[in-house]
Amino acid sequence: MGTEKKKRNKKDMKMNTKNSIVTYALVGLAAGTVAWLLLGTKEGRKQMDRAGDGIRELSKSIRKTTKEGIRRASEIANRATDEIDSLRSQAKSKSRAAIEKADRAAKSGVDKARAAVKTAKQKAEEEI
């Protein structure tokens, strides 16, 4: 029974090999036929030329679209940069204004405190 199984396996392997060879031969035949139709006939060459033209047009269109996309992205980046610079400038200006206001308030407070001290000193000297 073991030898019969081995014989069957060898037979199956030979069939698989033959099937593979036939498959490769058919694929080669099909590829050769397509190549002959495209390159060996006037109509085939016209088809190849049209396909090449289509590919060139597609490539040209893709390049154009890519350049336009890059240009738009650059414009958006420039606008964003300008807006950020403007906001930063506004923030600096407002912070300076706030600091100046706080400085004026502090000076006013100091001046009022000096005046109060001076008045208190004068009253104290008058009473002594």
Image (spheres, grey):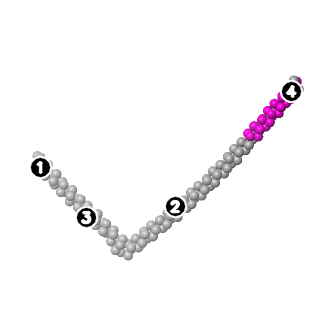
What residue did someone put label 2 on?
A: 66
**Quadrant of the drawing holding the C terminus:** top right
Identify the element where label 3 is drawn: helix
| Span colored in magenta | 102-127
Residue sitting at the far right: 126
Query: Which residue is at a point 64% across and 52% down the rendered structure image?
Result: 85
Q: Amino acid at mark 2?
A: Thr
Which badge, 4 or 2, comes first in the chain's sequence?
2
Q: Amino acid at mark 3?
A: Ala
Residue 116 position, x and y percent, is 82, 31
Left or right relative to 12: residue 123: right
What residue did someone put label 4 on?
A: 125
Q: Which mark is residue 4?
A: 1
What separation in Å lies between label 2 and label 1 (alpha carbons)?
67 Å
Which badge, 2 or 3, comes first in the chain's sequence?
3
What residue did someone put label 3 on?
A: 25
Which badge, 2 or 1, comes first in the chain's sequence?
1
Q: Amino acid at mark 1?
A: Glu
